[in-house]
Amino acid sequence: MSLPTPGRRAALVTALHLALAGVGVLALPVKAQQVFRVTTIPEEAATEQVRKFTPLAQYLERTLGMKVEFTPVSDYPAAVEALVNKKVDLVWFGGFTHVQAQLRSGGKIVPIAQREEDTQFRSVFIAKTDSGIKTLADMKGKQVSFGSPSSTSGHLMPRSNLLDAGINPEKDFRRIAYSGAHDATIASVVSGKVDAAALDITVWRKFVAENKVDTKAVDVFFTTPPFFNYNWSVHADMPAAMRERVTKALLDLSTATPEGAEILRLNRATRYIPTKADNYKGLEAAGRSAGLI
C-alpha cells in the first residue's frame, strides 16, 4: 500500500484536528455568561435612574466578578413583578412596593440593605407660596397630585396622614392626579396643573439644592412624621452565598473612597445598613388602613 503524499498527510492531520475539535465542542459546551440583573422603581425619570444607578452597577460588576445589567422599568408594578417572577436579581424598592412584592410572592422577598436615611424617612406636601395653602385642611376643594399609586412617600404615607387629619382625598379634593414620579410631582405644582402635592423629602431637597425649584414660589407646608422606606431586595430563591456577597458589597460602600462617595451621593445616602422584613410591617398596616391593600 502506498503512503500518502506529504500534502495529503497534512490534509489528513488538519481533518483529524478539526474532527477532534468538533468532539471537544460537543463534549464541552460553552457556558453562557452569567448576568446579574438590577432594576429600581421609577421614582424619577428613566434618564435620571440610569445616571444614579449605573455607577453602582459598575461597582457590583467588579465586586461580584460577573456582568451586571441595570435596566429601568416603566412603572412601580413592573418592578414588583420583575422580582416576584425572578426576571431580575436585585431591586431598589420603596417600602410600600416591598410590601406589595412580599404579598404578591407569598413572603418570598428578602430586604437586604437600606440607606441609613430610610430608618427615619419623611414625605413633604408642597404648594405655591401665594396659594393660601398652609395646612392640610387648606387642601380641601383643591386639585392635588400624588406620585405613583404604589409610592410610599408619594402616596401611601401622605394619604395616611391626610386620613389621620380627617381628610378623605376622594371626597374632599376637587381632583386627584397621579404624576407617576416625584420630579413630575414637583413640576405639576410649579406649572400650576395642581394646587398642592406630596412627594419624597429627599427628591425635594435635591431639587432645592440644585436650584431646580424656587422656594420663594413653591415650598413645603407640611412634613410627615418619620417612617421606614426604601430598601434593596432580592428573591428568597437566590443562593445564600450570593445574597451574602451582594449584601456585603452594598454595606461596604463608604464615603472614604472616591467610588463609594460618588455612588452614595447619587443614591442620596450616607451609607447602607442591614434591614429586615419586620421594619415594613408598619407600612403594610398603613396600606390596609388606607384601603390600598
Image (spheres, grey):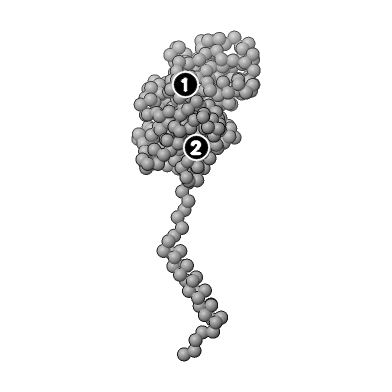
* Label 2 CA crowd tier, 10 Å (few <14, some 14–19, many 20+): many
Establish if 112 lies above or below 132.
Answer: below
Residue 44, by quadrant, is top right
Q: Residue at x 48, y 51 (%)?
A: 33
Q: Residue at x 52, y 13 (%)?
A: 222
Residue 226, by quadrant, is top left
Residue 25, by quadrant, is bottom left
Establish if 65 lies above or below 250.
Answer: below
- Dot 1 lies on which element? loop
- Dot 2 lies on which element? strand
Residue 176 in view, yes or no: no
Q: Position of residue 73 (x, y in %)?
A: 52, 37
Residue tagged 1: 121
Q: Amino acid at mark 1?
A: Phe
Q: Position of residue 149 (x, y in %)?
A: 49, 27
Q: Amino acid at mark 2?
A: Thr
Q: Between residues 262 and 144, which one lies in front from this camera angle? A: 262
Residue tagged 2: 39
Q: In screen coordinates, is 127 left or right of 32?
A: right
Q: Which is more N-terminal, label 2 or label 1?
A: 2
Q: Position of residue 249 (x, y in %)?
A: 45, 36
Q: Between residues 188 and 17, which one lies in front from this camera angle? A: 17
Residue 179's mark?
none
Q: Residue at x 47, y 67 (%)?
A: 21
Q: Residue at x 57, y 36 (%)?
A: 50
Q: Position of residue 75 (x, y in %)?
A: 51, 34
Q: Quadrant of the C terminus?
A: top left
1 and 2 marks in contact (CB < 8 Å): no
